[in-house]
Each structure stands twice: as structure tokens, then as C-alpha cells.
Image (cartoon, rainbow, N blue to C red):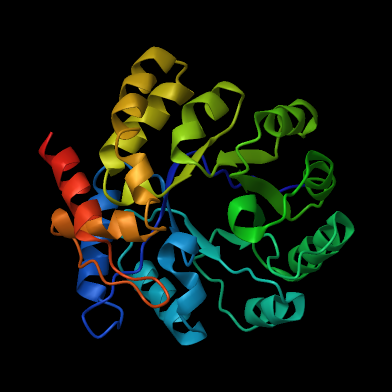
Amino acid sequence: MQSTIKFKGTGVALVTPFDKYHEIDYTAFRRILEHNANNGVDYFVVNGTTGESATTNRDEKRALLDFILANNTKKLPIMFGTGGYDTRDIISRIQNLDWDGVSALLSVSPYYNRPSQKGIIAHYKAIADTCPVPVVLYNVPKRTGQNLTAETTLELSEHPNIIGMKEASGDFNQIIEIMTYKSEDFQMISGDDMFTVPMISLGCSGVISVLANAFPAEMSTMVRLALEGNFKEACKYLFKLDKINPLMYEESSPVGVKETLALMGLCENYVRLPLVPGSESLRKKIREYLRQ
């Protein structure tokens, strides 16, 4: 029987702020946590793609988690990202992490070595068998080069420790198929800010959002209205945010959202190589949006 833990509403895919030496800026991180917690976000997601997990080491990942646990003033649920292309390494990291205070694991589909669907199923089952907290799948083919098919997702959804999926394929035929045949307990969470409202109309439970870092009140209100069935009002927020959403990815994520946060005075725009800070052209576009 699956866990009763529910991730409903808006989860923020937290950035990891850096200082000019490219070390973690915890003062800025506290500002971002407070900015989100005080403006309606329902849960935190740490150590995901937006948090530059590809370039933070194990000690930093643990330190980020510890900092959130110590500064989670509203006691929001925490989803912790642990994924990759080496199943044994992920299991080792799971076994060596203190999961106290963490509500779920978010694990991206294996990338680079491009396993078959059978391999993806075996990978996730091994993780779910090991993990002491519920597991949320993450399907993002644009980054991994591999899609979790509806058939694969539905098979994995039967595992008692796999409670949901962050879905960012953009394939609505696939999403509809999963929503048609999944169990009531299995949660589908939007992994694309702009697809959130239509996905909620199909029965999805909310979003894990990049934009919420900078616009938590707007994202949270949009999601709440959609969950209430008020899609007309929700779309008003969607259409406003649609003007800035492409800028978040124009020079790769999280470059765009960090430029936005810098212009808002919440953190600096530093990212770790091979990412580089946004161009002056991107900064100008974002500044114009914020002025409007």
C-alpha cells in the first residue's frame, strides 16, 4: 500500500545561490527560502536540476539539506533530489544519508547510458526497494534523452514505495494515458510551469516549479485556482507568466531564474561551469518584464 504523503499544490525547485567564489551563499539561500515560504509555496524541492545538482558534491548536497531543515520556519515538506546514471552509486548515497525530516526522494530517469525501458524499471525498483522514504519519479526527456513511457510509469506506479511522478515530457497523449489507468494514490506532478494548468485539468496534483523561486505568490495562486476548478482565473496568471517563462531557458536553466533573482535582490547571478551567467541581452529582457 502506498504512502499517504501527498505533494499537492506548488513545490519550488530551489536554486542553489553562489557567491563570487562559487561557494554556496547561505545568506541568500535563507532569503529565497523565506521568500517562498511567506508567499504560498507548499513544499521545497532541493538538489534538483534547478539547484545545479550536477555540479554540487555530496557534502554540499547534505549541507543544503541541513540548512533547509534548520531554516524551514513553516515546516513545509521537503523533497530531496538523488538521481543519476549509476544505480549502485545512488543506492550508496541513499544508504549513507540521514533521511530524518525528508518527506520524499525525487529521482531523475537515468541519462547518458540510455537504458531500455526494462532497465529503467529495474533501476527505479532497486532505488525504491532501498529508500526509507517514498520515491517520486522524474521524467524529463529533453535532459535525459530517454522517455519514461506510459507503460513503464504505470508498472512502476504499482511499487508500494513509488508514490508519484514529476512529468516534464510535454506529451499530453502520454499524460492522458497515465491519468486514465493509474491508481488513485499515484500522484502526477507537472514538471513544466506552463503545462501546469492543463495538467491539473486532467487530475494532476500541482507543479514542481522553476518560476516559483522568483514568483511564488503568482505560481501558488495560479495552482490553487486551478485545483479549485477556477481555470479562467488561473489562466490569467498563466498568460502573465508565459511572457517570462521562455527567458528562464533561453541560456539554459537555472541561468534565467538566477538573473531574475539577482534583479530582485534575492541572490547573485553566479552559476558553476560549464554554465555561465546570463548575457546582458537576457538581463535586459528580464528587467523589462519586471518593470512591466
At 31% across and 54% down in the image, what residue appears?
257
* Near-viewer residue (205 or 215): 215
User: In the image, is residue 286 above or below residue 252?
Assistant: above
In the rendered image, which quarter is residue 85 located in? bottom right
In the rendered image, the residue lying farthest to the front is 281
At 53% across and 45% down in the image, what residue appears?
191
* Position of the C terminus by quadrant: top left
What percent of the width, then of the height, locates residue 125? 81, 62
Image-based side of 40 in relation to 82, left or right:
left
Image-based side of 262 in relation to 251, left or right:
left
What percent of the width, then of the height, locates residue 186? 70, 40
In the rendered image, which quarter is residue 232 located in? top left
At 28% across and 67% down in the image, what residue appears?
277
Image-based side of 120 in relation to 110, left or right:
right
* Near-viewer residue (119 or 186): 119
User: In the image, is residue 83 above or below residue 61?
Assistant: above
In the rendered image, which quarter is residue 291 located in? top left
User: In the image, is residue 131 above or below residue 146?
Assistant: below
Residue 195 in sight in this render: yes
What percent of the width, then of the height, locates residue 215? 27, 43
User: In the image, is residue 15 above or below residue 234?
Assistant: below
Q: How many marks?
A: 0
Residue 140 in sight in this render: no
What percent of the width, then of the height, locates residue 109? 69, 60
* Near-viewer residue (212 or 96): 212
At 77% across and 34% down in the image, what residue appears?
182
